[in-house]
Image (spheres, rainbow, N blue to C red):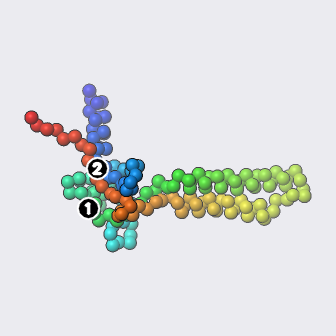
Amino acid sequence: MGWAMIVISHAVAGQIYLQLEKRGRARTLKFTVGQQLTWQEHHEKEWHTAKLVRIIPQDRLLVFDDRYVPLDRIAALRSFKGARWSKATAYQLYLFGVSWSVYALIADIFDPTDPYTKGDLAVTATAGVTGYLLYRLFRSRTYRVGRKWKLRIVDLRVKAQSS
């Protein structure tokens, strides 16, 4: 019986969350208590990053480690999940660069008329740098709250009715 109470207490914490949804789409992003959020407020240039401590649905407030923010003041959210394709593409470019050098070195060892040149090194370096830049440039995504994206608090707690 004791373990059931632990499981239930953990399940209840996830029933209030912050949801970012794109208009006309079923897929949403959910942020729960304990997650780190990066956001920008209206009429501010700097980004804030803090751990979400509590969500108060009645007042539409998000409570962070060092401040509380009304939901209406958030202008943008940033996700560091990254684009699915950027990491895979970067990995493929790294693999291409290393493979090019390995094949060029093998050709240099077995065929003296085909030496390892600066061109081979340039292909390897270009593939590596391009892969790194792709991964770094597309590692985060910014969601601007407004016409296209909507931010709301979802409260799925079951309220007990007294009889």
Residue at (28% x, 53% y) in the render = 153
Quadrant containing the N terminus is top left
Residue at (43% x, 57% y) in the render = 79
Looking at numbered disc 1 in the image, what kind of residue is underneath it? Pro
Give the mark, 2 or 1, whose residue is nearer the N terminus: 1
> Which image quadrant for residue 132?
bottom right
Residue at (22% x, 40% y) in the render = 158
User: Marks 2 and 1, Cα distance to the nearest angstrom?
Assistant: 15 Å
Residue highlighted by disc 1: 70
Quadrant containing the C terminus is top left
Image spot of residue 134 (x, y percent): 58, 60
Query: For numbered disc 1, what is the local secondary structure?
Result: strand
Q: Nearer the viewer, residue 149 or 106?
A: 149
Looking at numbered disc 2 in the image, what kind of residue is underneath it? Val
Position of residue 89 in the picture relative to residue 70 (left or right): right
Position of residue 6 in the picture relative to residue 98 (left or right): left
- Is residue 34 something that shows in the picture? no
Numbered badge on residue 154: 2
- Direction front: furthest residue: 24
